[in-house]
Amino acid sequence: MKPSTLDICGVAYKVVYTPQMGGGETNLDDKVITISTKHPKDIINILFHEIGEAILFERGLRYSRYSDGNDGVRFILTHHEYENVIADLVMIAKQLKGLKI
């Protein structure tokens, strides 16, 4: 079962799957996570990567200089904030029951 929506820090994110791309991306404005199905064994890794970015964004811990592309994205957080991120990730993982890893 692949989730079509996820509650990430109290915000509903739509999850879309497509074979037309490699990897994944998260539109943080529209709250849409797009995951590539081109390589099925990578879906869970891609999904958790995108979920992690969404958590950090929703918690205000993601800073980006878009002119630098992905290399311009910075995450700055304390250990306590990191613990909260992991707690969020565990809560989201509970929504993924039945997902084949």
Image (cartoon, rainbow, N blue to C red):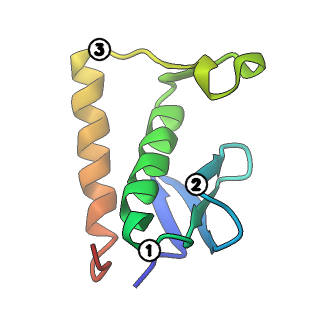
Q: Is residue 9 visible?
A: no
Left or right: residue 16 versus residue 76 is: right
Left or right: residue 42 versus residue 28 is: left
Between circles 3 and 2, the one closer to the viewer is 2
Q: Looking at the picture, does residue 4 appear above or below residue 24?
A: below
Residue 17 lies, in percent from the top left, at 60, 73
Label 3 – label 2 distance at C-alpha: 26 Å
Point 28% across, 83% down: residue: 98
Q: Quadrant of residue 23?
A: bottom right
Q: Secondary structure at mark 1?
A: helix
Q: Which residue is mark 2?
A: 24
Left or right: residue 52 versus residue 24 is: left
Left or right: residue 75 versus residue 66 is: left
Label 3 – label 1 distance at C-alpha: 34 Å
Between circles 1 and 2, the one closer to the viewer is 1
Query: In which quadrant will I find the N terminus?
Result: bottom left
Point 45% across, 79% down: residue: 2
The kind of residue on which mark 3 rests is Thr
Residue 40's disc number:
1
Mark 3 or mark 1: which comes first in sequence? Answer: 1
Q: Secondary structure at mark 2?
A: strand
Within 10 angstroms of label 2, few (less than 14), some, or many (20 or more) residues?
some
Q: Quadrant of residue 70?
A: top right
Q: Looking at the picture, does residue 72 appear above or below residue 31?
A: above
Mark 1 or mark 2: which comes first in sequence? Answer: 2
Residue 78's disc number:
3
Between circles 3 and 1, the one closer to the viewer is 1
The kind of residue on which mark 2 rests is Gly
Q: Residue furthest right?
A: 67
